[in-house]
Amino acid sequence: MTDTYARTASTWRNWAGNVTARPARVASPASVDELADVVRRAAAEGLTVKPVGTGHSFTTTAATDGVLIRPDLLTGIRDIDRTAMTVTVEAGTPLKRLNAALAREGLSLTNMGDIMEQTVAGAISTGTHGTGRDSASISAQIRALELVTADGSVLRCSAEENPDVFAVARVGLGALGVVTSVTFAVEPVFLLTAREEPMPFDRVTADFDQLVAENEHFEFYWFPHTGNCNTKRNNRSSGPVAPPGRISGWIEDELLSNGIFQLACSVGRAAPGTIPAIARISSRALSARTYTDIPYKVFTSPRRVRFVEMEYALPREAAVGALRELKAMVERSPLRISFPVEVRTAPADDIALSTASGRESAYIAVHLYRGTPHHAYFTAVERIMTAHEGRPHWGKLHTRDADYLSRAYPRFGEFTAVRDRLDPDRLFANDYLRRVLGG
């Protein structure tokens, strides 16, 4: 290994600051061959290996005391196939760079999450998703994968090549190897019209099924301690492009959603008794608006206020009942919740450990401002979610273990069997994977 891609250990922290790790060594390989050398050397020295992206996971999924691999140099588009309508991209490429590059080529992913800071490999490995009636998570748009396995070999998988690996590796948790490239399905760039509108909680929950059915992408936020929600409906449009006005967009997306919200969270953390009043004001501050733009400019938003998060995927038919239970729990408790609760949906997919595997799903996500004690709130929420057969997001805080998850996922054994074959000595293991997948 050369000095160009190995350096001494340093403390690594995730985006939220709730996870730290001090690896024995940090490597930044500049090619797949160099990455394979890193993996082989670590195995020979008895060190574990974990790749890390931009740290947007809240769990310890990327933490290691062995070799931490940074994919900073494994970035960029390898190939665009306009006949197959696919793009092959290096695994360390941030989604924001991928989205911008595709747009320049007149292409787009079909669906995406609401932030785009993650690397491609980090996003798919933890099951990152947006919201959609018909279009599913980022992982469901994968057509092929390449990864370096525990013996240092390069394995390619797709529906035709190593299909048993492909069936599980699209949400691989970093347990099967180090992802080096991903091939996504793409389509000609299109326009989305976003309609954001305040709506009472009782109306949103009463009309939830209808709102999901009538819109390609529907989501909403409920503000705890209020009966108020903010809804967002994204649907394909023939145009013309009509982005938010420069000033009004800055007011909504930066001043209110980030600047003033940051201040409100800071005040609420210092004086929790003020939170219900702040929530009532905040829930009325965002006004209705409509705008039209290319997909990534509509799906994604800047998120500058740092937080910790728990999110569960429920059978879609259970979502409204669970959300009403959550609201009732908050109202009868002494909890003071400064962050809105986010609700999204996804169609069923065929990926073994996708949170939407085999069932139409709704996602309920709860957040708290960084530095705010979260245990009591998240424990109470998790109790509700697990009572409805919830599946935790792999990159967000939860306490579930392999015993629970093996019952929540009918294809759990399929995943662990591939893991046993590809990584029998657990080169890619850490405490988090031992908890959620077993030894």
Image (cartoon, grey):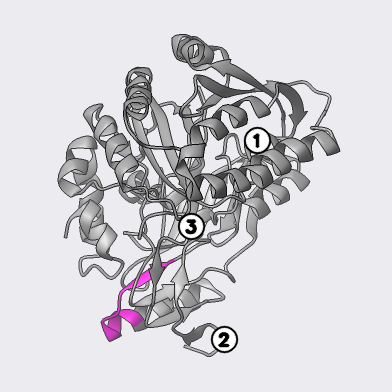
Front in this rendered view, residue 130 or 174: 130
The residue type indicated by label 3 comes to Ala
Q: Is residue 439 magenta?
A: no
Q: Name the residue under label 2.
A: 4
Q: Does the magenta stretch include residue 46?
A: yes
Instruction: Look at the picture and state if 414 lies above or below 333.
Output: below
Q: Mark 1 points at which residue?
A: 187
User: Residue drawn at (36%, 52%), measured in percent from left and top?
Assistant: 172
Residues tagged 1 and 2 counted as in contact (Cβ below 8 A)? no
Residue 23 image point, x, y percent: 38, 78
Ranked by sequence position, the earlier of labels 2 and 3 is 2
Circle 3 packing at 10 Å, graded few (<14), some (14-19), many (20+), is: some
Identify the image quadrant of the C terminus: bottom left
Front in this rendered view, residue 1 or 129: 129
The answer, for residue 172, to whether it is visible in the render is yes
Ranked by sequence position, the earlier of labels 1 and 2 is 2
Cα separation, mark 1 vs mark 3, equals 33 Å
Q: Mark 3 points at which residue?
A: 16
User: Residue drawn at (62%, 51%), measured in percent from left and top?
Assistant: 304
Identify the secondary structure beneath mark 3.
loop
Magenta region: 42-51
The residue type indicated by label 2 comes to Thr
Residues tagged 1 and 3 counted as in contact (Cβ below 8 A)? no
